[in-house]
Each structure stands twice: as C-alpha cells, then as structure tokens.
Image (spheres, grey):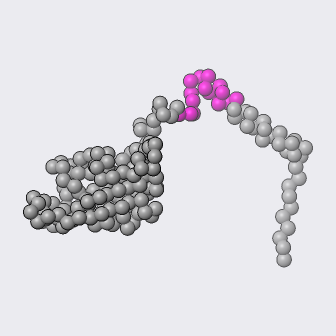
Amino acid sequence: MALVVQRPKLSLAEKLYLPAVLGGLMLTIRHFFKSLGGKTETMQYPEQKWDDKLPEWYRGAPTLVADEWGRERCVSCQLCEFICPPRAITITPEEIPRTDVWAKVEKRPKEFEIDMIRCIYCGLCEEVCPEQAIFLRKDYAITGYSRAEMKHNKAKLYELGGVMPDVINKWNDQK
C-alpha cells in the first residue's frame, strides 16, 4: 500500500519565494554593516594564511625526517606504501652494504616518492610507520606548475621534513 504524503499549503508569498529572498537580503545587509565596522568573515588568501588558526589535529603533507646525525629513519619496510589508500607512495628498497658504518639495519629506501596529487592527507602512513620516519607537516598550500613537480622524491621529502631528534629504534642496540 502506497503512503500518501500531503503537501503543505503555501501562501502566495511563499509561492513567490518572498520569505527566502527577504531572508537572504537581510543576511547580506547584516554582513555589509559588519564589514563597515571592520569585522570581516572572509580571509584574504594568499595574503592571509591559516597558520595561526590550524587546529592541533590538522593533518598536512607527509614528509620524511632524519635524525640529528643526518641518518635516514626509514627502513624501507613498505608498510606506508601498502596502507596508502590512493597508492600515492612508491618505495624502492635497497640493502645497506655490510661495510657501511650504519649496516645494522638491512634496508634503506633507494627511492621514495609521494605523489602529492594523489595523496589525500589521511595520515595512515604516519600512523603505521614503526620508525617514525614520516611526519605530517601543517602545510596545506602545496602547489606546482606540472604533475612532475607534484611528485616529491626522497631528497625533496627530506628537505621538507628536516631533522627530528629523538630516540630512533632501528639504531638502538637494545632492540
């Protein structure tokens, strides 16, 4: 059995959309007088940035970080690559030669690339990283003139991420 819904009876003013038009006009007039008093709701981007108003939990662009001695934290476990929903991360691991000073760790990334066009800033790569090698910057204005510029390679990611001094598990002999 079909359910019949009765439509409300509209007045002539409602049929002509007068209440909605007047409501919109009043809102515009109220914002006009606010702007005359110096209170604006609009941010003038790019002259004004959200940097001071970003919430603590904001997730921005992923970067790679090094320790205070310049060593890479990434051990090429590829967990971030596997967990990335849009498949924006590509890692090519390589073995560290036994003659290297830091040969305790088996692998390091030969190539590490994040396609920032595909990245959705979900933060899963940062959460899954066992060595805290990936950090999300509070950066929302990532631009480029071409698709190639938006693919951040390992050097660019370390340049953006910088140095993060902390206890690094892979270099810890107690591990």
Q: Residue at x 46, y 62 (%)?
A: 86
| Left or right for 35, reference 71 | right
Where does the N terminus fall, quadrant-wise?
Answer: bottom right
Q: Residue at x 39, y 52 (%)?
A: 151
Q: Position of residue 133 (x, y in %)?
A: 27, 56
Examine the image and state in which quarter residue 88 appears: bottom left
Q: Residue at x 46, y 43 (%)?
A: 145
Q: Is residue 145 magenta?
A: no
Where does the C terminus fall, quadrant-wise?
Answer: bottom left
Q: Is residue 57 visible?
A: no
Nearer to us in this view, 94 or 132: 94
Nearer to us in this view, 80 or 53: 80
Nearer to us in this view, 74 or 129: 74
Vertical arrangement, residue 92 with respect to residue 154, above or below: below
Examine the image and state in which quarter residue 51 appears: top left
Examine the image and state in which quarter residue 92 appears: bottom left
Q: Which stretch appears magenta?
A: 29-43
Q: Position of residue 93 (x, y in %)?
A: 26, 64
Q: Is residue 34 magenta?
A: yes
Q: Position of residue 96 (x, y in %)?
A: 17, 63
Vertical arrangement, residue 60 with respect to residue 122, above or below: above
| Left or right for 26, reference 166 | right
Image mark count: 0
Q: Residue furthest bottom?
A: 1
| Left or right for 135, reference 120 | left
Q: Residue at x 32, y 62 (%)?
A: 91
Q: Is residue 52 visible?
A: yes
